[in-house]
Image: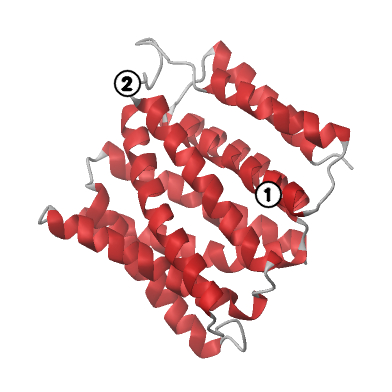
Protein backbone atom coordinates (compact mmCIF):
# COMPACT_ATOMS: atom_id res chain seq x y z
CA UNK A 1 0.00 0.00 0.00
CA UNK A 2 2.81 2.43 0.86
CA UNK A 3 4.39 2.06 -2.58
CA UNK A 4 1.04 2.55 -4.33
CA UNK A 5 0.56 5.78 -2.39
CA UNK A 6 4.06 6.85 -3.37
CA UNK A 7 3.42 6.16 -7.08
CA UNK A 8 0.19 8.17 -6.91
CA UNK A 9 1.90 11.07 -5.13
CA UNK A 10 4.76 11.26 -7.64
CA UNK A 11 2.59 10.82 -10.74
CA UNK A 12 -0.01 13.43 -9.79
CA UNK A 13 2.55 15.72 -8.18
CA UNK A 14 4.56 15.93 -11.41
CA UNK A 15 1.62 17.20 -13.50
CA UNK A 16 2.03 20.79 -12.22
CA UNK A 17 5.38 21.07 -14.04
CA UNK A 18 3.42 20.76 -17.29
CA UNK A 19 0.94 23.37 -16.07
CA UNK A 20 3.74 25.72 -15.00
CA UNK A 21 5.61 25.28 -18.27
CA UNK A 22 2.48 26.01 -20.28
CA UNK A 23 1.72 29.04 -18.11
CA UNK A 24 5.21 30.50 -18.50
CA UNK A 25 5.09 29.98 -22.27
CA UNK A 26 1.91 32.07 -22.42
CA UNK A 27 3.31 34.79 -20.10
CA UNK A 28 0.92 34.10 -17.22
CA UNK A 29 1.66 36.20 -14.15
CA UNK A 30 3.04 34.23 -11.22
CA UNK A 31 1.35 35.77 -8.17
CA UNK A 32 -2.28 35.65 -9.37
CA UNK A 33 -1.89 32.11 -10.73
CA UNK A 34 -0.29 30.85 -7.52
CA UNK A 35 -2.96 32.60 -5.42
CA UNK A 36 -5.68 30.72 -7.35
CA UNK A 37 -3.66 27.51 -6.94
CA UNK A 38 -3.69 27.83 -3.16
CA UNK A 39 -7.37 28.82 -3.05
CA UNK A 40 -8.09 25.49 -4.72
CA UNK A 41 -5.81 23.62 -2.30
CA UNK A 42 -7.40 25.23 0.78
CA UNK A 43 -10.90 24.54 -0.56
CA UNK A 44 -9.93 20.92 -1.26
CA UNK A 45 -8.71 20.30 2.29
CA UNK A 46 -11.74 22.03 3.79
CA UNK A 47 -14.02 19.71 1.81
CA UNK A 48 -11.82 16.74 2.59
CA UNK A 49 -12.30 17.49 6.28
CA UNK A 50 -15.98 16.65 5.85
CA UNK A 51 -15.22 13.07 4.81
CA UNK A 52 -11.92 12.35 6.57
CA UNK A 53 -12.31 10.40 9.78
CA UNK A 54 -9.09 11.72 11.29
CA UNK A 55 -6.11 13.91 10.57
CA UNK A 56 -7.67 17.28 11.43
CA UNK A 57 -6.62 17.54 15.06
CA UNK A 58 -5.15 20.95 15.91
CA UNK A 59 -1.95 21.40 17.91
CA UNK A 60 0.47 24.32 18.42
CA UNK A 61 3.29 22.32 16.81
CA UNK A 62 1.24 21.85 13.65
CA UNK A 63 0.46 25.58 13.54
CA UNK A 64 4.16 26.51 13.80
CA UNK A 65 5.24 23.99 11.14
CA UNK A 66 2.44 25.11 8.82
CA UNK A 67 3.32 28.79 9.28
CA UNK A 68 6.99 28.27 8.47
CA UNK A 69 6.30 25.83 5.65
CA UNK A 70 3.60 28.00 4.06
CA UNK A 71 5.84 31.06 3.85
CA UNK A 72 8.75 29.02 2.50
CA UNK A 73 6.70 27.22 -0.16
CA UNK A 74 5.34 30.57 -1.38
CA UNK A 75 8.83 31.97 -1.91
CA UNK A 76 10.04 28.67 -3.38
CA UNK A 77 7.27 28.60 -6.01
CA UNK A 78 8.02 32.17 -7.05
CA UNK A 79 11.71 31.27 -7.43
CA UNK A 80 10.83 28.14 -9.42
CA UNK A 81 8.55 29.95 -11.89
CA UNK A 82 11.17 32.64 -12.38
CA UNK A 83 13.76 29.96 -13.12
CA UNK A 84 11.41 28.27 -15.59
CA UNK A 85 11.14 31.56 -17.46
CA UNK A 86 14.90 32.04 -17.56
CA UNK A 87 15.96 28.49 -18.43
CA UNK A 88 14.84 24.96 -19.31
CA UNK A 89 11.81 23.83 -17.32
CA UNK A 90 12.88 20.19 -17.33
CA UNK A 91 16.26 20.90 -15.74
CA UNK A 92 14.70 23.41 -13.35
CA UNK A 93 12.24 20.83 -12.01
CA UNK A 94 14.87 18.06 -12.02
CA UNK A 95 17.29 20.09 -9.92
CA UNK A 96 14.42 21.01 -7.63
CA UNK A 97 13.54 17.36 -7.04
CA UNK A 98 17.11 16.70 -5.90
CA UNK A 99 16.32 18.91 -2.90
CA UNK A 100 14.95 15.72 -1.39
CA UNK A 101 18.52 14.98 -0.29
CA UNK A 102 18.10 17.62 2.44
CA UNK A 103 15.27 15.81 4.30
CA UNK A 104 17.24 12.58 3.78
CA UNK A 105 20.16 14.21 5.59
CA UNK A 106 17.69 15.28 8.28
CA UNK A 107 16.46 11.69 8.56
CA UNK A 108 20.05 10.57 9.09
CA UNK A 109 20.65 13.29 11.68
CA UNK A 110 17.43 12.23 13.41
CA UNK A 111 18.72 8.70 13.84
CA UNK A 112 18.22 6.70 10.62
CA UNK A 113 21.62 5.12 10.05
CA UNK A 114 22.87 5.25 6.42
CA UNK A 115 25.09 2.66 4.75
CA UNK A 116 28.37 3.54 3.02
CA UNK A 117 26.56 3.42 -0.35
CA UNK A 118 23.90 5.82 0.84
CA UNK A 119 26.50 8.24 2.17
CA UNK A 120 28.39 8.12 -1.13
CA UNK A 121 25.19 8.79 -3.04
CA UNK A 122 24.44 11.87 -0.96
CA UNK A 123 27.95 13.17 -1.57
CA UNK A 124 27.37 12.95 -5.33
CA UNK A 125 24.38 15.30 -5.25
CA UNK A 126 26.42 18.57 -5.44
CA UNK A 127 28.27 17.25 -8.51
CA UNK A 128 24.94 16.34 -10.12
CA UNK A 129 23.64 19.86 -9.64
CA UNK A 130 26.81 21.43 -11.04
CA UNK A 131 26.57 19.32 -14.20
CA UNK A 132 22.83 19.78 -14.70
CA UNK A 133 23.18 23.49 -14.05
CA UNK A 134 25.60 23.87 -16.96
CA UNK A 135 24.40 26.74 -19.13
CA UNK A 136 23.02 25.91 -22.56
CA UNK A 137 23.75 27.98 -25.60
CA UNK A 138 21.62 29.30 -28.41
CA UNK A 139 21.72 25.96 -30.21
CA UNK A 140 19.63 24.36 -27.50
CA UNK A 141 15.82 24.22 -27.55
CA UNK A 142 15.64 26.43 -24.43
CA UNK A 143 18.85 28.43 -23.79
CA UNK A 144 19.48 29.52 -20.23
CA UNK A 145 19.38 33.18 -19.27
CA UNK A 146 21.51 34.98 -16.73
CA UNK A 147 20.32 34.29 -13.20
CA UNK A 148 18.61 30.96 -13.95
CA UNK A 149 20.95 28.87 -11.81
CA UNK A 150 20.72 31.30 -8.89
CA UNK A 151 16.93 31.17 -8.82
CA UNK A 152 16.75 27.39 -9.11
CA UNK A 153 19.38 26.93 -6.37
CA UNK A 154 17.36 29.18 -4.06
CA UNK A 155 14.26 27.14 -4.86
CA UNK A 156 16.29 23.96 -4.27
CA UNK A 157 17.29 25.02 -0.75
CA UNK A 158 13.79 26.21 0.15
CA UNK A 159 12.17 23.05 -1.21
CA UNK A 160 14.55 20.95 0.87
CA UNK A 161 13.41 22.79 3.99
CA UNK A 162 9.78 22.10 3.04
CA UNK A 163 10.53 18.39 2.67
CA UNK A 164 12.18 18.43 6.08
CA UNK A 165 9.08 20.04 7.59
CA UNK A 166 6.94 17.26 6.10
CA UNK A 167 9.31 14.75 7.66
CA UNK A 168 8.94 16.49 11.04
CA UNK A 169 5.21 15.81 10.91
CA UNK A 170 6.09 12.13 11.18
CA UNK A 171 9.02 12.44 13.58
CA UNK A 172 7.03 14.55 16.05
CA UNK A 173 4.20 12.00 15.87
CA UNK A 174 1.75 14.51 14.44
CA UNK A 175 -0.02 11.97 12.22
CA UNK A 176 -3.43 12.71 13.80
CA UNK A 177 -2.97 16.35 12.72
CA UNK A 178 -1.60 15.70 9.22
CA UNK A 179 -4.52 17.20 7.28
CA UNK A 180 -4.83 20.14 9.62
CA UNK A 181 -1.16 20.74 8.80
CA UNK A 182 -1.89 20.60 5.05
CA UNK A 183 -4.84 22.94 5.41
CA UNK A 184 -2.94 25.54 7.45
CA UNK A 185 0.16 25.12 5.28
CA UNK A 186 -1.77 26.01 2.12
CA UNK A 187 -3.72 28.77 3.87
CA UNK A 188 -0.48 30.52 4.88
CA UNK A 189 0.88 30.21 1.33
CA UNK A 190 -2.41 31.61 0.02
CA UNK A 191 -2.11 34.63 2.32
CA UNK A 192 1.41 35.31 1.02
CA UNK A 193 0.34 35.08 -2.64
CA UNK A 194 -2.74 37.26 -2.11
CA UNK A 195 -0.56 39.86 -0.44
CA UNK A 196 1.93 39.78 -3.32
CA UNK A 197 -0.81 39.99 -5.97
CA UNK A 198 -2.59 42.81 -4.11
CA UNK A 199 0.63 44.79 -3.85
CA UNK A 200 0.86 44.70 -7.65
CA UNK A 201 -2.90 45.17 -8.16
CA UNK A 202 -2.83 41.95 -10.18
CA UNK A 203 -6.27 40.35 -10.40
CA UNK A 204 -6.13 36.87 -11.99
CA UNK A 205 -7.04 36.65 -15.65
CA UNK A 206 -8.92 33.71 -17.18
CA UNK A 207 -5.68 31.95 -18.20
CA UNK A 208 -4.22 32.30 -14.71
CA UNK A 209 -7.43 31.06 -13.10
CA UNK A 210 -7.46 27.99 -15.34
CA UNK A 211 -3.81 27.13 -14.75
CA UNK A 212 -4.14 27.80 -11.02
CA UNK A 213 -7.09 25.43 -10.74
CA UNK A 214 -5.20 22.70 -12.60
CA UNK A 215 -2.01 22.92 -10.53
CA UNK A 216 -3.94 23.46 -7.28
CA UNK A 217 -5.98 20.28 -7.70
CA UNK A 218 -2.86 18.27 -8.55
CA UNK A 219 -0.91 19.55 -5.55
CA UNK A 220 -3.84 19.03 -3.18
CA UNK A 221 -4.55 15.46 -4.29
CA UNK A 222 -0.85 14.58 -4.44
CA UNK A 223 -0.43 16.01 -0.93
CA UNK A 224 -2.93 13.50 0.47
CA UNK A 225 -1.02 10.58 -1.05
CA UNK A 226 2.34 12.15 -0.17
CA UNK A 227 1.70 12.58 3.54
CA UNK A 228 0.05 9.15 3.87
CA UNK A 229 3.03 7.47 2.20
CA UNK A 230 5.60 9.33 4.29
CA UNK A 231 3.89 8.12 7.46
CA UNK A 232 4.23 4.50 6.27
CA UNK A 233 7.79 4.53 4.89
CA UNK A 234 11.19 5.49 6.35
CA UNK A 235 12.39 8.81 4.97
CA UNK A 236 15.66 7.33 3.72
CA UNK A 237 13.61 5.15 1.34
CA UNK A 238 10.63 7.39 0.55
CA UNK A 239 12.46 10.56 -0.46
CA UNK A 240 15.01 9.03 -2.88
CA UNK A 241 12.39 6.94 -4.70
CA UNK A 242 10.13 9.98 -5.05
CA UNK A 243 13.09 11.96 -6.40
CA UNK A 244 14.23 9.58 -9.13
CA UNK A 245 10.67 8.95 -10.31
CA UNK A 246 9.92 12.66 -10.55
CA UNK A 247 13.18 13.31 -12.41
CA UNK A 248 12.55 10.69 -15.07
CA UNK A 249 8.92 11.65 -15.63
CA UNK A 250 9.78 15.36 -15.92
CA UNK A 251 12.64 14.94 -18.38
CA UNK A 252 10.57 12.65 -20.60
CA UNK A 253 7.57 15.00 -20.60
CA UNK A 254 9.67 18.07 -21.41
CA UNK A 255 11.44 16.24 -24.25
CA UNK A 256 8.24 14.90 -25.81
CA UNK A 257 5.99 17.92 -25.30
CA UNK A 258 8.40 20.86 -25.71
CA UNK A 259 11.47 19.27 -27.29
CA UNK A 260 13.74 20.41 -24.45
CA UNK A 261 17.09 18.83 -25.24
CA UNK A 262 19.88 18.28 -22.75
CA UNK A 263 23.49 19.02 -23.59
CA UNK A 264 26.24 16.50 -22.87
CA UNK A 265 27.05 18.00 -19.46
CA UNK A 266 23.42 17.89 -18.38
CA UNK A 267 23.03 14.32 -19.60
CA UNK A 268 26.06 13.35 -17.52
CA UNK A 269 24.56 15.16 -14.55
CA UNK A 270 21.25 13.35 -14.98
CA UNK A 271 22.98 9.97 -15.27
CA UNK A 272 25.05 10.75 -12.18
CA UNK A 273 21.90 11.82 -10.34
CA UNK A 274 20.21 8.50 -11.13
CA UNK A 275 23.30 6.66 -9.94
CA UNK A 276 23.35 8.74 -6.75
CA UNK A 277 19.69 7.94 -6.06
CA UNK A 278 20.35 4.24 -6.67
CA UNK A 279 23.17 4.39 -4.13
CA UNK A 280 21.05 6.30 -1.62
CA UNK A 281 18.31 3.66 -1.84
CA UNK A 282 20.77 0.77 -1.58
CA UNK A 283 20.14 -1.51 1.38
- The answer to whether residue 52 is visible is yes
Residue bearing mark 2: 145
The residue lying toward the viewer, choosing from 159 and 241, is: 159
Secondary structure beneath dot 2 equals loop
Task: Name the residue located 46 percent from the left edge and 33 percent from the top edge.
Answer: 153
Q: Earlier in the sequence, mark 1 or mark 2?
A: 1
Q: Is residue 1 above or below residue 104?
A: below
Task: Name the residue located 83 percent from the left edge and 42 percent from the top edge.
Answer: 114
Quarter of the rendering occupied by the N terminus = bottom right
The percent position of residue 97, horizontal first and vertical second, equals: 56, 41
Residue bearing mark 1: 106
The residue lying toward the viewer, choosing from 92 and 15, is: 92
The residue lying toward the viewer, choosing from 85 and 54, is: 54
Q: Is residue 53 above or below residue 64?
A: below
Task: Name the residue located 47 percent from the left edge and 59 percent from the top edge.
Answer: 69
Task: Name the residue located 53 percent from the left edge and 83 percent from the top edge.
Answer: 58
Amino acid sequence: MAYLLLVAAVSIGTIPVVVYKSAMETNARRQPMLAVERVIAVTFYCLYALVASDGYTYSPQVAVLALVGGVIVAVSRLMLLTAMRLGPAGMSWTILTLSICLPVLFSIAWGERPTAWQTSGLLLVPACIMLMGHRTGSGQARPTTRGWLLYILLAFLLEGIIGTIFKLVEELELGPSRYMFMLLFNFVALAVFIGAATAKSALPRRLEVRRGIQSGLCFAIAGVFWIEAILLMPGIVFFPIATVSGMIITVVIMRLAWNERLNSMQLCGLALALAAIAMITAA
